[in-house]
Image (cartoon, helix red, strand yellow):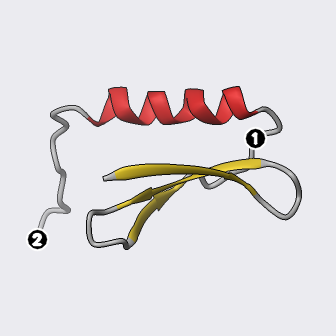
């Protein structure tokens, strides 16, 4: 998986997470005025992803 960082039409920084097959699987959901803030958000996602438990609703 790869994180991609780019400026949007409003001049804000955004990230996308792309799977090995080229499909986008996650986005920043918001724009950042500073690139460093966008990169910090990516670091937070990387750190929190770890070995998280998957929860499903009860039947």
Q: Residue at x 42, y 36 (%)?
A: 45
Identify the image quadrant of the C terminus.
Answer: bottom left
49 to the left or right of 42? left
Distance of label 1 from label 2 (alpha carbons): 39 Å
Q: Residue at x 15, y 41 (%)?
A: 53
Is residue 19 or residue 56 the one in the foreground?
19
Q: Residue at x 66, y 50 (%)?
A: 14
> What secondary structure is marked by label 1?
loop
Q: Residue at the far left: name it.
A: 59
Is residue 36 or residue 57 the one in the foreground?
36
> Residue 38: percent from the left, percent from the top?
64, 36
Q: Residue at the far right: name it.
A: 10
Q: Residues within 10 Å of mark 1 (few under 14, many from 20)?
A: some
> Which of the two discs, 1 and 2, labels the residue nearer the N terminus?
1
> Residue 48: percent from the left, percent from the top?
34, 30
> Residue 33: percent from the left, percent from the top?
83, 38
Q: What count of labels does the image hold?
A: 2
39 to the left or right of 13? left
The reply to whether callout 1 and callout 2 are in contact (CB within 8 Å) is no
> What secondary structure is marked by label 2?
loop
Q: In which quadrant of the rendered view does residue 41 lie? A: top right
4 to the left or right of 33? left
Q: Nearer the viewer, mark 1 or mark 2?
A: 1
Above-or-below relation of 56 to 32: below
Which residue has dot 1 on it?
32
Which residue has dot 2 on it?
59
Q: Residue at x 18, y 52 (%)?
A: 55
Q: Residues within 10 Å of mark 2 (few under 14, many from 20)?
A: few
Q: In which quadrant of the rendered view does residue 56 lie? A: bottom left
């Amino acid at each position: 998986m790869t994180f991609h960082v780019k400026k949007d039409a409003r001049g804000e920084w955004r990230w996308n997470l792309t799977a090995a097959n080229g499909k986008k699987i996650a986005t920043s959901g918001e724009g950042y005025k500073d690139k460093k803030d966008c990169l910090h958000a990516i670091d937070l996602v990387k750190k929190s992803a770890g070995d998280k438990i998957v929860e499903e609703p009860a039947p």
